[in-house]
Amino acid sequence: MYHDISMVFCGAAGQGIQTITDALLNVLKKYGCNIFSCTEYMSRIRGGSNTAEIRITENKRDTYVRRIDMLFALSHNVVEHLKDRISSSTLIFAEKERFGDPWGDNCIDTPLTKSALEAGSAAFSNIVAAGVVLGLFGIPLELFTAYLRVKFAAKGEEIVAKNCIAAKLGYSFGRDTATTANISLQISIPADRPERLLMDGTTALGIGAVAAGCNFISSYPMSPGTGLLTFLATRTKEFGIVVDQAEDEIAAINAGLGASYAGARAIVTTSGGGFDLMQEGVSLAGMIETPIVIHIGQRPGPATGMPTRTEQGDLNLALHAGHGDFARAIFSPGTLAEIIDTTQQAFNLAQQYQIPVFILADQYLLDTVSTIETASVKRLTVKNFLIKTTENYQRYAFTDDGLSPRGVPGYGDGLVRVDSDEHDENGLITESFEIRRLMVEKRLKRMHSLRETARAPTLIGTVDQAEMLVISWGSNRGVLEEALDIIGNRAFAGIHFSQVFPLSPVIKSLFENKKLLVLENNATGQFADLLALETGRSISRKILKATGEPFTVEEVVDALNQSYHG
C-alpha cells in the first residue's frame, strides 16, 4: 500500500506529455485520489526536455518533490535531464528498442510505439502510456475509456474507438507487468472524500476574478500571465466581460484605467517584463485615485530571463513601481483556495480605497493542478463604492480618511473631472504648494486603514512555543507546510503571508523572541528585507533559490535541519 507516489513523465515538446497528465489527473480524481501535478517546460515548440510530475498522496499535499518513484521516459535524453532525481529505487518505463538501454536494472521495456501503431497511429503512444499507469495501479479501465469518449467525442467515433484501443493495450501491459514483475502498486485512498474539484492556478485566478464581478480585462500576452486573459476571453458572453488584447502593455493598463474611470471592475494581467512598461500607468492610477487590479505572473528576469520558468523576483518591482508616493496593496496567495479568495479581496480593496492592487502569482503556482475541496471555494460579497453625483460634486473632496466619494460619468448630475497633473478638489490643475501638500497627505492617509485591516498571515504549527519561525509567501506555502510536518520538530513553526504589503500589525508580537528564517524564490531575499524594514527585526537566515525551479520538499527539510543543528 503506497501512501505517497511521485510519477514523472519526461519527453520532448510535442510528444503529448500534457495529454498524458490531463488524462491521468481526471481519472485519478474520479477514482478518489488526492493528486497534485506540476510541470517544467522549455521555451520551444518542439524538442528539448519537458517534465510533468504527478503525486498521489493519502494526506493532501500541494508541493513538488525531487524524489521520482516511477519515471516514464519518452525520449533519449531523459537520463541526462533528470540524473539528479533518478535513484536506485526509481522504476523506469522506456522503449529500449528506440533508445538503447542507458537506464540500468530498474528499467522495464515498455512498447509504447508498438502498441500505439497497433491502435492505428504512433500518435496514440501518450494514451498507451496513461493506460500503462492505470493498469499498474489496477484502477478500472472503464474510468479511462469514459474520459476518452468525452474528450474526443468531437473528433468522431473512429478516433474515439482508436483511443480506447490504445488505452486497453497500455492497460493490459500495465496489469501484466504488475503481475510478472511482482510490482504491487496499490494506492491508499483517503477514507474521507468530500466533494472536490480538479483545478489549476490560472483557473482559480479566473474564478476569483469572475466572482469579484470583473467585467473588463486588458492585456498584451506574456507568459505566464496570458492564461487569465484566455480564461476570461472564453467566458465573455456568460459573464458580460469586455476583453481587450492591447497593442502593448502601456495601452493595456491605460485601457484598464479608462474602463475603471467609467465604472468597470477592471484587471490587467502580465508578467514582470510586461509590467515594466506599465509603471507610468500605476502612477496615473495613484494620482487620479482610480482602482485597478494588476496580476503579475512572475518568471525569472532580468529582461526575458527564462520565459517558462518560475521565480518570486517581482516583489520589489510591485512594491516600488511608479514615481511619487501613493498607496497600494499587494497579495501573493499560496493555494488554489487562497487565489480565489484573495483575488476577490483585491477587487474589493481596489474599489474601496481607489488604488492599484497587485496579485503576485508565479509560473509554478499558475500551472500546478490539484484537487480542491468544493467547500473551500468561497464567494465574497461584491462591494460597490460608487455614489450618484450631484451638481456640486467634487471628485477629490478632502475627507477625514482621505477617501473622496467616487462617482463615474453619467451616474448623477455631477461632472467627474480627473487629471494626471496635480489638481484641486474639483480636478482642476493647480500649482498651489498648499493644495499639493494636502493632496499628497490625502492620498497617503488611507495607508493607515490599509495597514490596520491587512490580512493576517496563516500560522503553521505551534507558533507561540517555537524557537524558530520559518516565513514564506506566495507559492511556498505548500512546501513549507509539508517540510515542517516531515521534520516534526516543535522548535519550528511557520508563518505564511498571502498579503505581503501592507503587513498586518499582528506580526510584531508573533516575531517576539523568535529566530526568523525566510524562505523565498529569489536571489536577494526581497520579502526578508521588507520584513526587516517594517518590523525592525533582523533575519537570522534567508533560504533562497533563483534557478528557475521551485523548492523541493527535500531541500527545504535539509535547509531547516541545517539551521537547527548549525
Image (tube, helix red, strand yellow):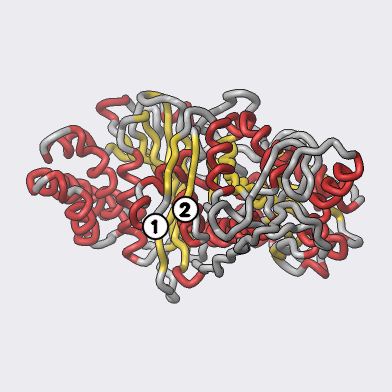
The N terminus appears in which quarter of the rendering?
A: bottom left
Residue 163 position, x and y percent, is 16, 46
Badges 1 and 2: C-beta atoms under 8 Å apart? yes
* In the foreground, 350 or 121: 350
Which residue is under mark 2?
Answer: 215
Residue sitting at x 40%, y 59%: 198
Looking at the image, the residue that sits furthest to the front is 391
Residue 455 located left or right of residue 126: right
Question: What amino acid type should be assigned to the residue bearing mark 1?
Answer: Phe
**Would residue 472 be seen by someone viewing this image from the given angle?**
no
Residue 550 located left or right of residue 515: left
Residue 84 located left or right of residue 15: right
Residue sitting at x 56%, y 42%: 258
Q: Secondary structure at mark 1?
A: helix
Residue 140 position, x and y percent, is 24, 62
Residue sitting at x 42%, y 33%: 50
Residue 272 position, x and y percent, is 61, 34
* In the foreground, 190 or 69: 190
Looking at the image, the residue that sits furthest to the left is 158
Q: Answer few, some or many: residues within 10 Å of disc 2's Cα (few below 14, many 20 plus, some between 14 and 19).
A: many
Q: Answer few, some or many: residues within 10 Å of disc 1's Cα (few below 14, many 20 plus, some between 14 and 19).
A: some
Inter-mark Cα distance, 1 to 2:
7 Å
Which residue is under mark 1?
Answer: 239
Q: Quadrant of residue 142?
A: bottom left
Residue 176 located left or right of residue 57: left
Question: What amino acid type should be assigned to the residue bearing mark 2?
Answer: Asn
Who comes first in sequence, dot 1 or dot 2?
Answer: 2
Residue sitting at x 79%, y 46%: 424
**Would residue 122 be seen by someone viewing this image from the given angle?**
yes
